[in-house]
Amino acid sequence: MRSSPIGVFDSGVGGLSVLREIRRELPHERLLYVADSGYAPYGDRPPEFIQARATAITRALIGLGAKAIVVACNTATGAAVETLRQTFSLPIVAIEPAVKPAAAATRSGVVGVMATSVTLASTNLLRLVGQYPAPGGTMMQACPGLVEQVEQGDLDTPATRALVAQYVQPLVSAGADTIVLGCTHYAFLEPLIREAAGPGVTVIDPAPAVARELRRRLSLATLLAPDSVVAAEHYWTTGDVAQATRVVGQLVGYPVMVEQLRDGQA
């Protein structure tokens, strides 16, 4: 089991920002990644739909030999992580918006959260905001359209820049000096977000914390890969393989082979 791979999934390619941090933290692990792009975006889907997709993909990753699962999607965490933990016995680590460190870091007292509408309405996020309130309030900003821009690989186009500015400016105008990236896709837009927010605003990506928690969980379960394991990444999509191959390669920075994950598998 120690040499078995770790399964990572997202509604699309955004979770690659989490995969990147897992690779940095755990250089000897084998990684499996599923982009559920055939059903993306999750952001405006009913919770029951997201639960069904998350369960199907987790089963597929277990079928591929995964020893642990990382839910690299804030929307899936909010809608489905409890279902996954009740259904499966292997370690499940899930990303969630970094509200706690943001509340501790803010100087103005105002924190902004950029996320999908489903994440913003999730009981998980509302619980976090209630548990770790920012002194001056936590501003919620839904960002329709940003996931789709990243899914297309449009990371620095005029349309993407305009959308980012449209969503960042209300937060800055309200006094937010700390912005939480509440969607893994947004990590790939972080340069634009920082540019729109200005140098006085801190942007927090929770992906490094997820990688550290994964290491902790694997260590507790005696599941960390031995140094002799040859690290590798394998990619699947439920969407268009040619499109996924292009965008995944763009985001990870090297050519990749993406395979089709068919409905019978997920």
Image (tube, rainbow, N blue to C red):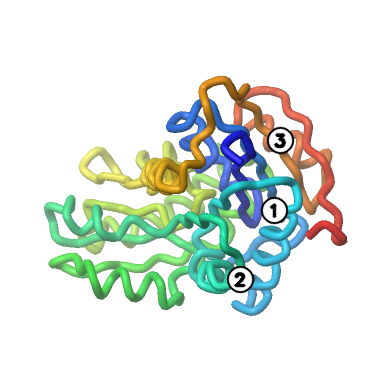
Q: Residue at x 18, y 50 (%)?
A: 105
Between the C-alphas of marks 3 and 2, the distance is 25 Å
SS type, badge 3: strand
Q: Which residue is mark 1?
A: 62
Q: Is residue 157 visible?
A: no
Q: Is residue 131 above or below residue 258?
A: below
- Quarter placement of the C terminus: bottom right
Amino acid at dot 3 = His
Q: Is residue 95 above or below residue 17?
A: below
Q: Quadrant of residue 90?
A: bottom right
> Is 30 positioned to the left or the right of 164 in the image?
right
Q: Position of residue 4 (x, y in %)?
A: 64, 39
Q: Position of residue 171 (x, y in %)?
A: 31, 60
**Which numbered mark, 3 or 2, is in the foreground of this view?**
2
Crowd around label 3: few <14 · some 14–19 · many ≥20 (10 Å): some
- Quarter placement of the N terminus: top right
Q: Position of residue 213 (x, y in %)?
A: 39, 47
